[in-house]
Image: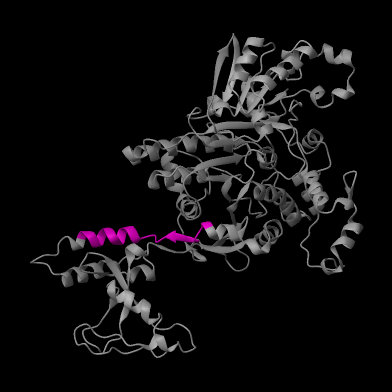
Amino acid sequence: MTNKMKFETPNLTAENVAKIAELFPGVVTEGKVNFDLLRSMLGDEVYGDEAYEFTWVGKRAAIAEAGRPIRKTLRPCVEESKDWDTTENLYIEGDNLDVLKLLQESYLGKVKMVYIDPPYNTGKDSFFYRDKFTMDADEYDEAVEMYNEDGLKNFHENTKTNPRYHSDWCTSIYPVLVLARNVLSDEGIILINMDENEIVNLQKLCAEVFGESNDLGTIIWDKRNPKGDAKGISYQHEYIVAYAKNKLSFVEKCKMQRPKKNAAAIIAKANQVFKKVGAKYTLEEANREFASWVSVQDDFSGGEKAYNRIDQNGDVYRPVSMAWPNKKKAPDDYFIPLIHPITKKPCPLPERGWRNPSATMNELLRAGLILFGKDETTQPNRKYLLKENMYENIPSLLYYGGSDTDLLAELEIPFDTPKVVSVVKEHIQSFTANGDIVLDFYSGSATTAHAVMQLNAEDGNKRKFIMVQLPESVDNVDFPTICEIGKERIRRAGDKIKAEAGLTALNLDIGFRVLKLDDTNMNDVYYAAGDYTQDLILQMESNIKPDRTDMDLLYGCLLEWGLPLSMPHTHEKIDGFTVHTYNDGDLIACFEDRISEKAIREIASRNPLRAVFRDSSFSSSPEKINVFETFKLLAPNTNVRVI
């Protein structure tokens, strides 16, 4: 293929129309859908005049905006990055809607978890809301005074006196949720923090974007501190809404469980106590000491406190009833009595029978997992070993009233009300695994990045993060924008985590590549060559804006071709010309104004998957044709394009 690169995000609306045309070819003509004909083909059963619908002022514009293409790019900023050459993490500065559009090709279906904490719409939130989607972006930016004198985005409060108070919030959230769904893998999950102000609308938005069938539930986070400024009931809880991209695929890969929070501490204490057992210290005494310690642990749940016994092997266990749990009587096979191992007499049966059939009960007996009393008068219980039950189902209630104010003070990072690292880490641990990508496009102080690095240090996995944050100005001399706060927090937190982990974290990735949203690398003539005369085109020096570097162009090509932005790349001189190689040949590029035939033949001989050159590298059409013929001969499978 030899066509010119587009440098424009996909038109998702046009792609959806194409999908309809594949299923119903007759209903699409010249890119337009004949909905009357489509309704006729689908039949009356699926169409009605009335249906349940969630709507708001501006919904149609929000839907259209999610699919509208843009001509922007992400420019690499190596000097603000950390470990650029080796890291697989990204920190992207820019409006999250535009950034998500740019990431659609490179990360389509590749993100395991989206974890966001969007504006709660308390009436005091400052968030950018583009309510005139039909305007040219530059016209709108100027109309709403979007940028200040320093080129940073201005923000305006969405106050409760605004007649479109809830509508504005819905319109700002809807498009990013649509685009977030696209980048999630089939087994991916999105978690969204919210309070009482917009929880109802958020749940309706998620049901529409992700589908009601993919609702995983909502966690109620009891923060143990009622709000003092309440004019009604004083809320002391917030919400964490969870939706899967595809619930069936998600539950196949994820058990929806979390590690028991205090299991490791319980086992450690048991090991300490059990080591004392010997001629002068009996197992019975050890159990009394251990049970006494468990009983005074205020942060243990009731289920954790039940694990208060140590067996002869040093294993922690708890007794659990083996009675049939249902109201209906169990089958006859569930009524075979257990024989006491000492008295050899049958033990009492539960009124409705055992929980398990006789074959399973015999297996439990052989494994030593049935607990008998002193004699046959006590009904036996099942022995549950803690080491075999280190995980528990994720409950709908989360009790945590702390904050990370002290942690940020220790890091000397100025930021009010950050997300809590331990809470974010707990959910990342429950829903992700080695190599997974975690995306947060309301990054704030970069708590999610902090949590990913901390968890990787603890379990040795290599999760990767993508942080996206708009450079909102803040009143701080050292950190003029939220992005500066977030980047510095990642640097300091990463160093702290690695230092504390020691030898176990030698290969821990605490770096990040900084990319910044900007207008396209290309001049207007690139997109509308047909609007210019040939003489005018010849007078123009380049299709490319003069301030753009090779790295800018390389990353623009990565976005165009849908390549990940965190892979290794090198540059070298071939016959005196600078050549860039991305991820061992996924892409080879040369952006020189001229390039020799020798260099072109060397590039082709390496058989890259993709190759790109500047259009101006070739002085004539025959010379350009010769380049393509060289690739056909030496690298017939290489996709060659020009810019």
Question: Can you say whether 356 is above or below 640 in the image?
Answer: below
- From the viewer's perspective, is 339 left or right of 428? left
Q: Give the residue displayed 40% in from the left and 85% down from the top.
A: 334
Please provide percent x and percent y for residue 25. Answer: 86, 50
| Relative to 351, 22 lies left or right | right
Name the outermost residue toward the left.
279
Looking at the rendered image, the quarter that the C terminus falls into is top right
Task: Left or right? Give the position of 452 relative to 129.
Answer: left
Can residue 502 be seen in the rendering of this structure? yes
Q: Position of residue 435 (x, y in %)?
A: 49, 43
22 drawn magenta: no
Query: Number of marks in the image?
Result: 0
Let me know if residue 270 is in the magenta part.
Answer: yes
Classify residue 528 by image quadrant.
Answer: top right
Q: Residue furthest front?
A: 633
Q: Which is nearer the eye, 471 or 265?
A: 265
- Would you say residue 131 is visible in this rendering? no
Q: Position of residue 316 (x, y in %)?
A: 28, 66
Describe residue 133's horizontal placement relative to residue 117 as left or right: right
* Residue beneath the point at 61% across and 25% down: 608
Residue 17 in the image: state x and y as whole percent.
Answer: 82, 48
Q: Determine the residue positioned at 84% across, 54% down.
A: 24
Q: Is residue 614 above or below residue 420?
A: above
Q: Which residues are magenta?
A: 253-272
Q: Residue at x 89, y 24 (%)?
A: 531
